[in-house]
Image (tube, rainbow, N blue to C red):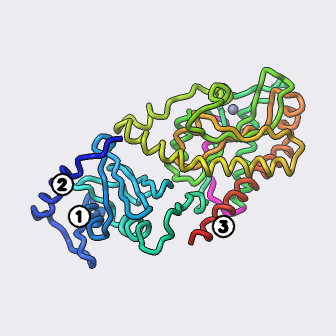
Amino acid sequence: MKKLQKEFLILILSALVFSGCSTTPTSESFATYNVNGVSYLSLTNLCNAKGITWDYDIFARVISLSRGTHNVSFMVGDSLILVDGSAQYLSYPVDMYQGMVVVPYGFKDQVIEGVFREYVLPGRSYPMALSLKKIVIDAGHGGEDPGALGRTGLREKDVNLDIAKKLAAILREDGLEVVLTRSTDRFISLPGRISIANNANADLFVSIHSNASRTRSLNGFEVYYVAPSVNDSKRAYSSARSVPISIEHFELASSSMDLKAIIWDMIHVSNQAESVSLARKICRVMDDNSDSRIIGIKGARFAVLKGARMPAVLVETGFVSNREEEKLLRNSIYRQKVAEIIAKGILDFAQVSSTMEVAQR
Ligand SMILES: [Zn+2]
């Protein structure tokens, strides 16, 4: 990535700062700008006042702020920011105003005072899952897409939906906010599922599936996370069993493909560690509480997980193609047990994350 032309921007910025736009001085004498009814501050003013250096990658349109060991990156037009590798959201998107990069007023507290404050321990990043409040549960397939079919006719989409609803009920009882991508037997595209999670600003995305294989004897429980390099992509795609749709082609239609791809790459790297940790927790609870064979955790590039802006896992609850597991998955009591196991894994994960939070403060 090529970094350059900051001078060019500063030139424009200084020209505008001295050209007398209508501004109101704040208590800290930062001029505020009213952009569509929202108060904005000049990024340059904030950074200059606090000794924060910033770079603007003119091609990728990514702005990076840094001071000491802290780094914050974001893009004009987006409210998503990366703070030391973890995603956060601003209340309003970063914008341009009369040629200046402007940030919503809350940016000062959230980023300038929050991230770049003096007494922060160096080199720590705050995992986003520590604020685990909202989870999106995705029941795989649905409607015209039945998913895998068992030999006695059990449909994966029905198993997924029931486990998802049971899981949602358990998590809600534990005080978490849960959004279901579907609560009925209907079709949702893979991009549609990710959009639901991203628009909800969820802290976690958990997709529920059941597996199938031509090898009837194959059984077991496994959890996938998104891996940037794919060691198992072919299997992953066939297991997702819907046409994989490149995320770039629908979400990026309105903006440059490169810049969001860059941000997403960064987010995926930072979310991956948490996804792996969540996947491990779920498998461990399953191992402790059932006789199922634990296949383990695997990295794969599932289309349904790929565009998620939060840690995301896909749980394969068992093989409907296997006689024994089809029988189990057909049983509502067993599905309840699976839901409880996944819920415990999620809650264990949340607990570890909040312990980390305390340790870091
Ligand atoms: Zn599936």
Whether residue 137 sits left or right of residue 37 in the image: it is right
Residue denoted by label 3: 355
What is the distance, in whole Å, between disc 1 and disc 2 at their CAs?
10 Å
Q: Earlier in the sequence, mark 3 or mark 2?
A: 2
The stretch drawn in magenta includes residue 175: yes
Residue 217 vertical placement versus 352 (above, below): above
**Whether label 1 touches label 2, CB < 8 Å:** yes
> In terms of secondary structure, what is the magenta stretch mainly?
loop
Disc 3 element: helix
Q: Residues within 10 Å of mark 3 (few under 14, many from 20)?
A: few
Quadrant containing ligand 1: top right
The residue singled out by tag 1 in the image is 33
* Magenta stretch in the rendered image: 174-186
Residue visible at 54% across and 50% down in the picture: 270
Give the residue displayed 66% in from the left and 47% down from the top: 276
Q: How crowded is the residue under tag 1: few (<14 C-alpha within 10 Å), some, or many (20+)?
A: many
Q: Can you name the residue that lies furthest to the left here?
A: 19
Name the quadrant of the N terminus. Answer: top left
Amino acid type, label 1: Tyr
- State the SS at label 2: loop
> Which numbered dot is residue 98?
2
Q: Is residue 128 magenta?
A: no
| Residue toward you, 116 or 173 | 116
Q: Looking at the picture, does residue 252 appear above or below residue 212? A: below
Dot 2 surroundings within 10 Å: few (below 14), some, or many (20 or more)?
Answer: few
Is 33 situated left or right of 155 in this image? left
Q: Earlier in the sequence, mark 1 or mark 3?
A: 1
Closer to the chain start, of discs 1 and 2, is 1
Is 16 drawn above or below residue 242 in the view shown?
Answer: below
Quadrant of the snapshot with the C terminus: bottom right
